[in-house]
């Protein structure tokens, strides 16, 4: 797909049923939502929504898009959860080798370091 923003916009319209609701969730102007929907429908050559006075209802094609977009958003959220914070903290196994005479000095430092980095084993 060439423009994921349009798909994401269509997903929010299908989920919420209104352009204004989608615009609020996405943090864009309602005209941007309409423009995205029109562009996506034009590119796909199919109507994704039935427009009503009270909002938008997904067509069969729109419902298909909603299912795929929901799964994609769920997977993206899971991915963000897994990678969020990588590189910011220390994790894994730390092996320290030292002389016995240094141990009394090193132990409190390593204990504090481990408390500050709970991902460290």
Image: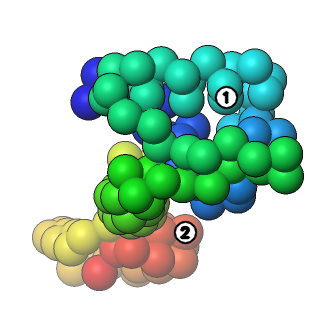
Please tell me which residue lies in front, 115 or 26: 26
Q: Is residue 52 above or below residue 116?
A: above
Res 47 quadrant in image: top left
Question: Would you say residue 70 is visible in this rendering?
Answer: yes
Please tell me which residue lies in front, 105 or 94: 94
Looking at the rendered structure, the secondary structure element under dot 1 is helix
Question: How many angstroms separate mark 1 from mark 2 (CA)?
Answer: 45 Å
Could you tell me how many numbered marks the image carries?
A: 2
Which residue is disc 2 drawn over?
A: 116
Res 4 quadrant in image: top left
Residue at 40% across, 20% down: 42
Please tell me which residue lies in front, 107 or 16: 16
- Left or right: residue 103 versus residue 52 is left
Residue 27 image position (x, y, % from top left): 76, 34
Residue at 76% across, 47% down: 52
Residue 106 image position (x, y, % from top left): 39, 71
Label 1 close to label 2 by CB (< 8 Å): no
Res 84 quadrant in image: bottom left
Q: Quadrant of the C terminus?
A: bottom left
Which residue is disc 1 drawn over?
A: 33
Residue 81 image position (x, y, % from top left): 44, 63
Looking at the rendered structure, the secondary structure element under dot 2 is helix
């Amino acid at each position: 797909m060439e423009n994921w923003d349009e798909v994401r916009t269509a997903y929010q319209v299908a989920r919420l049923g209104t352009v204004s609701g989608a615009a609020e969730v996405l943090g864009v102007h309602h005209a941007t939502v309409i423009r995205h929907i029109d562009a996506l429908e034009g590119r796909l050559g199919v109507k994704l929504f039935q427009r009503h006075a009270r909002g938008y209802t997904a067509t069969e094609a729109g419902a298909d898009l909603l299912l795929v977009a929901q799964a994609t958003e769920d997977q993206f959220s899971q991915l963000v959860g897994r990678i969020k914070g990588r590189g910011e903290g220390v994790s894994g196994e730390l092996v320290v080798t030292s002389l016995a005479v240094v141990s009394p000095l090193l132990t409190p430092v390593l204990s504090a370091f481990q408390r500050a980095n709970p991902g460290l084993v």
